[in-house]
Image (cartoon, rainbow, N blue to C red):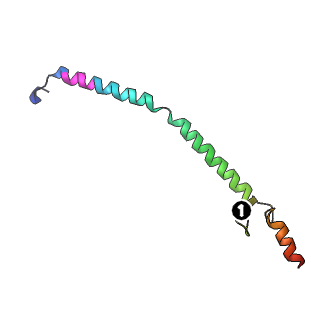
Amino acid sequence: MRRKGRSAWAGVLLGFFFNLIGLIILLLLGDRSKEQRAAEAERQAAAKRASTYRECPHCKEEMRRDAMTTAIQTPLLMSRRSS
């Protein structure tokens, strides 16, 4: 560091100072694993919901996979069949 007009101790002190700032920033950022666990739980819930529900062909509302139509559409379909 002498070639640049600074002493070696100035370099050591600057390195130590910026290292401490970096450590403080890392401590303040928090734990990313909590965010990752929450995102994974949301993905699992969406996958379970997708396997249990499907879209109604008439009104595009979410309905149980084993149902023929949604509860809202059933009376309408019954009235159409009887006429």
Q: Quadrant of residue 35?
A: top right
Where is residue 64? Give x, y as percent.
77, 58
The answer to whether 10 is drawn above or below residue 57 in the figure is above
Q: Residue at x 75, y 59 (%)?
A: 63
Q: Residue at x 55, y 40 (%)?
A: 36
Where is residue 74? Give x, y as percent.
83, 66
Magenta part of the protein: which range? 10-15
In the picture, measured across the screen, residue 19 lies left or right of residue 74, that is left
Q: Residue at x 71, y 62 (%)?
A: 61
Q: Quadrant of residue 77?
A: bottom right
Q: Quadrant of residue 75?
A: bottom right
Q: Residue at x 58, y 44 (%)?
A: 39
Q: Which residue is mark 1?
A: 61
In the picture, measured across the screen, residue 12 lies left or right of residue 7, that is right
Q: Nearer the viewer, residue 70 or 7?
A: 70
Q: Is most of the magenta stretch helix, strand or loop?
A: helix
Number of marks drawn:
1
Where is residue 33? Give x, y as percent.
53, 36
Query: Of the residues shown, which amino acid type is indicated by label 1?
Result: Glu
Q: Nearer the viewer, residue 59 or 11?
A: 59
Placement of the N terminus among the 4 image quadrants: top left
Q: Is residue 32 magenta?
A: no
